[in-house]
Image (cartoon, rainbow, N blue to C red):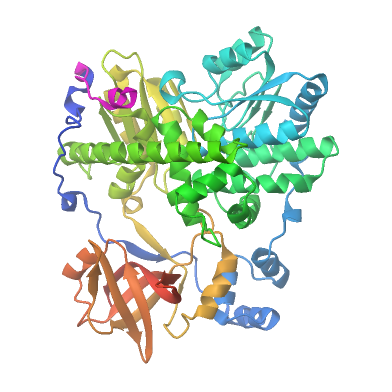
Amino acid sequence: MARQEACRPAPPPASLAAHDAPPLARRPSVNPTTLALPPRRWVSRYDGPPDAAAVADLVGALSLPEPVCRLLLLRGYGEEAAAKAFLKPRLEGLGSPFGLAGMDAAVARLGHAIERGETILVHGDYDVDGICAATLYTRALRELGARVEPFIPHRLRDGYDLSLAGVRAAAAAGATVILTADCGVVAHEAVVAAAGAGIDVVVTDHHTPAPTLPPAAAVVNPNRRDCAYPEKGLAGTGVAYKVCQALFEARGAAQESLWYYLDLVAIATIADVAPLVGENRLFTRFGLRLLPQTRNLGLRALLRTSGLAERPHLGAGQVSHVLAPRVNAVGRMGEGAWGVKLLLAEDEAEAERLARHLEEENRTRQAVDREMLAQALELLEREYDPKRDYGVVLAAAGWHPGVLGIVASRVAERIHRPTVLIAAEPGAARARGSARSIPSFHLYNALLSCAAHLERFGGHKHAAGLEIRPERTPAFREAFNAAARAVLRPEDLLPELEVDAELTLQEATPELYRFLRHFGPFGVGNPTPVFAARGVTVAGYPRVVGQDHLKLVLAQAELRLPAIGFRMAERLKEVDVARTAIDVAFHLQEDRWGGGVGLQARLLDLRPAA
C-alpha cells in the first residue's frame, strides 16, 4: 500500500497550476508525430579519412584487415604499440592510486580506524554506482579486518547525498568514521554536523565539487581542482576501487584479491554512463569477463532471475538494459538498502529471495515510468515551443521522485533538448528534480548559473539532481532556458548520427566483427563503430516483425547482409526501400536465433541514396 500511496496524485499547488500532470488513472493520448525530431544529420566522427600509407603500415605490422586498421587510426591508435595495448589491455596498466589528491590522508585515517577497531559507516548513494561502491568498500575493508556498517539513504525519506540522516545513522552505529561512496563532495552541512558529533568524514566521490571542499578528514575526487590524476571520468565505484587499491598497498595485502570486485566496478561504470576509456575501459573489460563466473552470490542470483545466467559472454548492453535497472529500481522506488543487502548476501536462498524482490520493484518502476512519460509528453504537447525552448523544465504534482531521471532521459532523447523534471507535492517546502542533457550542453554548469533559484543541486555534465522551492519553479524555468539559449546553437538542437567509416557489404564479414569485439566494451567515449554503406538495394521485400521492427536483406553486387531496424517500421512510409537504392547506417552484430549464429546489420538510419 505504501508504494501505491507514494504514486497517488494530489491537487497541485497554485504556483504549478499551469503545469499539472493529468491524473495517473487517465492515460493521455499523445500524438508522437508532433514531438518527432527532424531527420538525423549524418556526420563523420572524425576530421577526415586516415592516411592511406599509415593504414597500409598498420596492416603490415599487425596483420589485421584494412577496415580494422582504418578504425584504429581514426580512434588514435596508429602506432603499433598503442594499437596492441588498446586491443589487448592489461590490469597492470592501472595508475598508482596515490596520484589522487587526498589519497594519503584517506588511507591514513582509514588505516588508523582499522588498527584501533573503530566502526566505519560506509555511506553510499541509492543508485547503482552508490550501491556498488558501498558494497565494494564493505567487502574490501572487512577483508582487511575493518569493522564496517553499510548505510544507504532512503530516497523519499532522507533525500540524496550525505545528509543529517547519515550522521544520525553513524552515531547510532557507534561509528567514528563515515566513509562516503559516490557522494559527499558538496555535503558541507553534514560534514560539519558529523565533526560536531565527534565523527570524522572521509569523502570519496566523482561528482563536480563546489568552489570549496567540505571540511572533511580527507576528500578523494579526481575532479578536485588541485587533483592532477588524469582519469577524470571515474565513476564513484571506480574511485572506491582506487581507495581500496591504496589501502591494500599500504597494508601489504595482495592486489589480486581486489580483482574479484571488478564485476561491481564494471556494472557501476556502465550504469553511471562513465566514459569507457582509460582505466574505466580496463575496469569494465575485465569486470564483464568476470561477471558470468562471479563469486558474488547476489549477482549470481540476479543473473538467474533476469535471464542472463546462461550467457557465456555479457556486454555493456546487458548491464545497462537488464542488470542495472533492477539494482536501480529499489533505490528509485525508495529503499536502496535492498541492493546492498543483495550484493552482500552470503546465503544462496537469501540471495534468491532478494533478487526476486528486485524483480518486483523493477516491474513497479516500469509501470510508474510509463505513466509519468505519458504525462510528460502531454505537458510537452501543451507547452513546448521548439523555437522558444532550448532548455525544458516540466513540473507536476504526483510524480514519483525516484523515476524522474529515467523519464527526463526519455524526454531529452525525444526532443533533443536538456530537460529537467520536477516533482512538487502540495504543501511541501521543497520539490525534487532530476535533469538530463544532450552532448553539447554542460548540465552542471547550467545549474550553477541558475543557483540563485535552487536550494541544492549536484551532478556532472550529463546528469544532475536538484531541490527547489516550488514557487521558484517559473523563475528557474526561465533562467534554465536562458542558460541553454546562451550556449546552444540551432545546429546543436538537431540530432546527429556520427559515422565512423564507410564500408562495402563485401567488407562486412564475420572476421571483421570478431576483430571489432576487441575494441570494446563500448559506451560513452568508446562508441560502438557506426558504418555507412551507400547505394545498397533491398533483396526481396522488407518485413515488419513484432509491432514496429523492420527486417530486410541488404544487397550490393552479389553480397547479401540481413538487417534489422528496431522501431523503424514507420520509415517504410518515408522511403520506398523496395524500389530505391538506399544509404544505410548500422552496427555490425551477431544474430543468435534458433541455435545458430549469423552476422547482421543493426540499422540506425536509412535514407534514399545520395
* Residue visible at 44% across and 40% down in the picture: 356
In the picture as drawn, the residue positioned furthest to the right comes out as: 252
13 is within the stretch colored magenta: yes
Residue 145: where, in percent of width, then height? 78, 29
Residue stretch in magenta: 1-14
Q: Nearer the viewer, residue 49 or 356?
A: 356
In the picture as drawn, the residue positioned furthest to the bottom comes out as: 558
In the picture as drawn, the residue positioned furthest to the top comes out as: 196
Q: Nearer the viewer, residue 376 or 40?
A: 376
Whether residue 576 is visible, yes or no, is yes
44 w.r.t. 157: above or below: below
Q: Nearer the viewer, residue 507 or 75?
A: 507
Residue 456: where, in percent of width, then height? 45, 22
Quadrant position of the C terminus in the picture:
bottom left
Q: Quadrant of residue 220?
A: top right
Q: Quadrant of residue 346?
A: top right
